[in-house]
Image (spheres, rainbow, N blue to C red):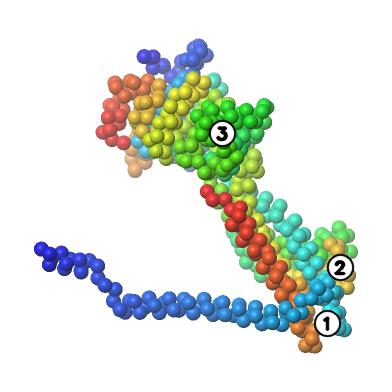
Amino acid sequence: MPKVRPALDAPERREGAQAAIFSLKDVQVAYGGVPAVENVTFELVKNEITAFIGPSGCGKSTLLRCLNRMNDLIPSASVSGQVLYHDQDLYAPDIDPVQVRKRIGMVFQKPNPFPKSIYENIAFGPRVLGMKGDMDEIVESALRKGALWDEVKDRLKTNAFGMSGGQQQRLCIARTMAVEPDVILMDEPCSALDPISTGAIEELMLELKRNYSIVIVTHNMQQAARVSDRTAFYNVDKLEEGKRVGKLVEFAPTEKIFTAPDDKRTEEYVTGKFG
Amino acid sequence: MAVTETTITRKVVERASSGARTKDLLFRAALLLCLFVAVLFLGVLLVDVAIDGIPLITPEFITNFPSRLFAEESGIRPALIGTLYLMVLCAAFIVPIGVAAAIYLEEFADARRWWNRIIEVNIQNLASVPSVVYGILGLAFIVRGPIDIWGLGKGSPTLLAGALTLGLLVLPVVIIVSREAIRAVPPSIREGALALGATKWQTIWKMVLPGALAGIATGVILALSRAIGETAPLILVGAIAFRLTDPTIDGQFSALPIAIFQAAGEPRPEFQILAAGAIVVLLAVLLLMNSAAIYLRNRYEQKW
């Protein structure tokens, strides 16, 4: 089992599949000046699935959204600390959030297909990015990556709203694949799905990790244990006057988190004592 | 044991008292009566106008110019054409400005800033300003103002001035309905597009606006149907009833409400009755527009 890396180790010193894609140092996200999550320091490794777990309100989704600057959409949100993506500061003033989201895709909690045909759902991304190539091929390849091609190849022109929830979520994953990102962020992608659809998506994630790096927020500890290579456990610190702030408690290989965590709170959470 | 259970059941679910039921019935009857009064007046008006007006509707009535001498030869051609012109010009004016303003307020304006809040409150208030006030505004700033300066109207009231005045009148309504239609597009659609690397503009243009289109179109049509029924502002910006040539954009003009207003003020009864004919035509145009709005809403409205 790989050792937990010290967070400040320079990523360029490592090579191949073990290179760090994200390196966070003392990151804090605040809404309207009130910190929602703070003291986050870790590195994410290429071609791995990293799971964020923790009780509600611990800031795991907030943190996920700061990895592709989706928090920019909330005017009151502010990020401090350092978020390095391939050694590039994502919050440097000359970084265009649109370019960031092109490289770092996102799949949301509730499937959010566009009110268009299945084909157009996939083609939207490549079109707005001006990607070259045969659109039919791009669509087919994305749907294959999303493990959806065989189910929908005969009804590409039908409205995506007619698909089941699980299919819609796989369509959203396929849509993200179509723009060829480097990292896929998933914010509780299975929370609105039945167990069979959830199984299909977990299988898909294991397949995708060969070519992509994945970060998944999940409420489901079994899911984190099944799919992820590393797990970050966040917890809520209750401050005075009822204020709460999320903190990263432990970040380690998934097996260690679930069998021999260093922190007592991690152990209590993964064994179901709270949360 | 069984006795106790029955007692409990009776206590838990008491029968409604007859007094409560009577109150309920009375209330329903009162509601029905109110509805009946409203529908009755509308019905009487429609039937009365139809009885007087429909026999007047002949091809000549539609295509003839108005006459001061022979009521049976008098027609509404310039008024009808004027109304159609006003509608098209007004739409060309309010759609781009109204939708753009709605996009700004919904997608860009930071509601925490005081100036955006002032704009918002003002638009709500402008929507309820009486139309005659807009007429004065149009007279002062459009008939005598910029349009005159541009030399289009040569100092006289023009159809373009009338269309712009009506446009100002319904612009707040268009902004409000467009904002509602834009707000009805769920944030998750915007997030989905942005997460794929689309720019804000691409997201608005390709996702938000198509999703809001049916709502915007419905609102614009309803706003236009209010605009073409307005009389006061047109009187103030100088529309005339007796126009003996087809209207032009930069010339004097007539409109259906003006023709109705003029005919109703005639002392001679055979001319007075012409108002009913013009009313039937105006109502037909309005009904057509409202049906188009309902059709558009049912056919293209996006269910999320």
Residue B186 circle label: none
- Residue holding disc 1: B72
**What's the residue at 44%, 24% (across, down)?**
A206
**What's the residue at 62%, 36% (across, down)?**
A124
Mark 2 or mark 1, earlier in chain:
1
Q: Secondary structure at mark 2?
A: loop
Cα–Cα gap, marks 2 and 1:
20 Å
The chain that hosts pointer 1 is: B
Residue A111 spot, x, y in % from top left: 49, 39
* Same chain check for tags 2 and 1: yes
Work out whether residue B281 can be spotted.
yes
Residue A233 spot, x, y in % from top left: 36, 28
Say if A252 sits above or below A173 in the image.
Answer: above
Work out whether residue B126 can be spotted.
no
Question: Amino acid under label 3?
Answer: Lys
The chain that hosts pointer 3 is: A
Q: Residues within 10 Å of mark 2 (few under 14, many from 20)?
A: some
Cα–Cα gap, marks 3 and 1:
67 Å
Residue B242 falls left or right of residue B114: right
The chain that hosts pointer 2 is: B
Residue B38 falls left or right of residue B232: left
**What's the residue at 54%, 31% (across, down)?**
A149
Residue nearest the viewer, comparing A179 with B301: B301
- Residue holding disc 2: B246
Q: Do callouts 2 and 3 mark residues in contact (Cβ within 8 Å)?
A: no
* Same chain check for tags 2 and 3: no
- Residue holding disc 3: A153
Q: Residues within 10 Å of mark 1 (few under 14, many from 20)?
A: some
